[in-house]
Image: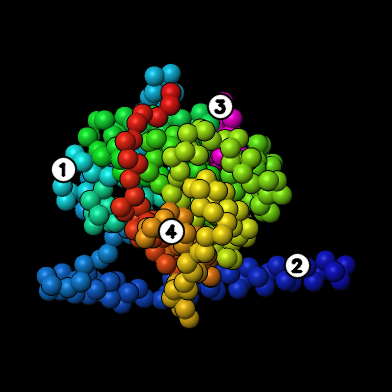
Amino acid sequence: MARSFTNLFFKAAKKLSKLQRTAMRMATPKPARKRATSARKAAAKAAPATSTPRQPVAPSLGSGRWEGSRQFSDGQGRQLSFARYTPVSAPPTGMPLVVMLHGCRQTALAFARGTRMNQWADAGGFMVLYPQQSMTRQVQRCWRWFQPDDAHGGAEADLIAALIQSEVARHGLDPERVYVAGLSAGAGMAALVALRHPSLIAAVAMHSGPVVGDAHSATAGISTMRRGSVKPLLPMLASVSDPAVFQLGMPALILQGQLDPAVAPRNAKQLFEQFRALNDLRPEDVPVERVLGLGTDKAYRRVDLLRGRKAVLRLCEITRLEHAWSGGDASEKYHAKGGPDASALVWRFFQGLRRTGAGRPKS
């Protein structure tokens, strides 16, 4: 009985308290708030025309022409979505082409915004293509580098190569200056495109990418990312490549964050050794090493192997970077503000590299 009375007492007290709060809110005058709002609106109208405009939420895609959500179909009926960026500095005829391959859970648009590669296209006068993986092929939009056979990742690489060939012909681009770059899964696919179509691609850039040829399933792909490979490196490379690449060579830039929790830095070192052998750079050739940006959040170690005075193979180990595009727009996922500007490093490496006598990709 005592417990029942206590419960009734507290229920009545709560109800009374609620009624009191409601009464106080109704009694509180509100005109002052409305007057303040009206005053702010009046002040905004009276502000001079030279006041600072509100900045757009989305970053710029460059001053040139952005064409998103385009569709390409090859001769076998396979389709690929892509976006195209053309700078306004000059007509497309004779321009170089840079192909950018996004990572998992990314889109072409997000990758363009995050990397800011379009701004470098404005400065350098080159066209950019952003192929986009279909969610019907892979639910997280991962390029299937971890299944490099002809029915999966190899087919995707060939489809991207067919798109490149079509765009080069359509716009009269320079066939000797076609380059491919990618992040994470996009780096794995960039390697496949370059290795399967060496007569088409003049150089490749791989940011936070896996060692080539180790994985042949999604589960094995995760293992490769976390630990690199324990297999002999050159046979793995040969297993996914057109044999012509060993005669033609493939200049390569490798970028890797040293704090990356998703792709172990060991992958970058193994990629370096694979492309060292591929480009016929001898083990006894002494690399040129530099540490740049020391003491800042842009610090990185650069290792170059040269042919003559030109870097054919470059490794950039970025000290404070995790799993993200270095020096990008951090408002986009998988892009970091810290670290050197990876887009600048990619374009500067590509400049001056040519595929002399570039031919057609294999069908």
The disc, 2 or 4, on the residue closer to the chain's N-terminal end is 2
Q: Which residue in the structure is indicated by mark 3?
A: 150
The disc, 2 or 3, on the residue closer to the chain's N-terminal end is 2
Evaluate whether residue 348 shows in this view.
Answer: yes
The disc, 1 or 2, on the residue closer to the chain's N-terminal end is 2
Q: CA distance from mark 2 to mark 3?
A: 75 Å
Question: What residue is rendered at 57% in x and 35% in y?
Answer: 240
Q: Which residue in the structure is indicated by mark 2?
A: 8
Q: Is residue 186 above or below residue 292?
A: above
Instruction: Tell whether label 2 touches label 1 (CB within 8 Å).
Output: no
Q: CA distance from mark 3 to mark 1?
A: 36 Å
Q: Which residue in the structure is indicated by mark 4?
A: 306
Question: What residue is rendered at 33% in x and 35% in y?
Answer: 358
What amino acid type is highlighted by mark number 3? Asp
Query: What SS does tag 3 mark?
Result: loop
Instruction: Tell whether label 3 touches label 2 (CB within 8 Å).
Output: no
157 or 54, which lies in front?
157
Q: CA distance from mark 1 to mark 2?
A: 83 Å
What amino acid type is highlighted by mark number 2? Leu
Q: Is residue 202 above or below residue 172?
A: below
The disc, 4 or 3, on the residue closer to the chain's N-terminal end is 3
Magenta segment range? 139-153
Which of the numbered marks, if any, corresponds to residue 270?
none
Instruction: Find out whether residue 146 is within the magenta segment.
Output: yes
Name, please, the residue furthest toward the left. Answer: 49
Q: Is residue 74 left or right of residue 157?
A: left
Q: Does the magenta stretch mainly form a helix, a strand or a loop?
A: loop
**Coloring scheme of the render?**
rainbow
Query: What SS does tag 1 mark?
Result: loop
Q: Which residue in the structure is indicated by mark 1?
A: 91
Query: What SS does tag 4 mark?
Result: strand
Please tell me how crowded label 3 is: few (under 14), some (14-19), or many (20+) other residues with Cα within 10 Å.
Answer: few
